Image: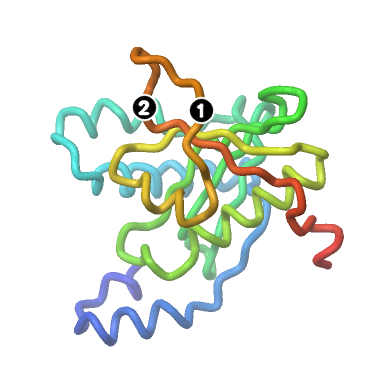
Amino acid sequence: FALLLTPRSDYQRRSTMYNLSAKYRRARPSDLDAINRLIKLAVMNWPLPNRLKRRAVPVMQYDLVDFDHFDLFVCERGKDILGVSAVDLSFAPTKGLLHGLFVLPIIRGHGIGKQLMQLGFGWAADNQLESVLMKAEGVSVSYFQKLGFEPLKGLGPNDYPYQFEKDLRGSVRLAQAS
């Protein structure tokens, strides 16, 4: 990440990162160490107490068994993993579960998360899923609402409050987009 961490003015940093020639693809088991480093950087940048962030990191990271349960997608530039998303396509007969979305903190706001989400939505739609469910952190609620997630209806007073669903019916499928 040396290029990305070079001190620059905010304008220079944003214009350089916006033009990154990044590729999006399915993750491979060989990406696991880089993915977990990225997740640690992302979680440690959340607006939460440090103790809570340290305890959350191991829970958020993936292992080889997760490749049997999730479809992971990455954004990469060169050998650097800049973002990762994970979708569980077997969550329910017609619903997937967005398990995670993490982007390198220094380049948030340049569409990497959105592109990873679109890739996951297309993958889920190609697999005949009608919607994707997710639980958001409170600070990211508005981000997911901008991406078309709607608050889950019928939550009880003891349910996690930031649960959302994205309707995929009518979404462009990856096979159609090629």
Could you tell me residue 99's position as x and y percent?
Answer: 53, 34
Q: Tag 2: Cα neighbours inside 10 Å, few (<14), some, or many (≥20)? A: some
Q: Position of residue 56 (x, y in %)?
A: 30, 29
Q: Residue 70: x percent and y percent?
A: 64, 33
Label 2 secondary element: loop
Q: Residue at x 53, y 30 (%)?
A: 63
Q: Is mark 1 on a helix, strand or loop?
A: loop
Tell me the quadrant of the picture where the C terminus can be found: bottom right
**Dot 1, crowdedness within 10 Å: few (<14), some or many (≥20)?**
few
Query: Which disc number belongs to residue 153?
Result: 1
User: In this orientation, which residue lies closer to the viewer: 58 or 85?
Assistant: 85
| Mark seen at residue 134 | none
Q: Pick the residue in front: 154 or 41.
A: 154
Would you say residue 81 is visible in this rendering?
no
Q: Residue at x 45, y 49 (%)?
A: 144
Left or right? Give the position of 16 relative to 70.
left
Q: Image quarter for residue 44?
A: top left
Is 52 displayed left or right of 105 in the figure? left
Is 149 placed above or below 60 here? below
Q: Are marks 2 and 1 in contact (CB under 8 Å)?
A: no
Give me the residue at 39% from left, 44% from top.
39
Please state which amino acid type lies under the numbered disc 2. Pro
Question: Residue 17, position in %: x, y?
Answer: 40, 77
Residue drawn 56% across the image and 47% down it: 31
Along the line of sight, which residue is nearer the eye, 23 or 18? 18
Q: Vertically, is 3 above or below 51? A: below
Quarter occupied by residue 108: bottom left
Residue type at mark 1 is Lys
The circle drawn on residue 161 is 2
Report whether residue 174 is seen. Answer: yes
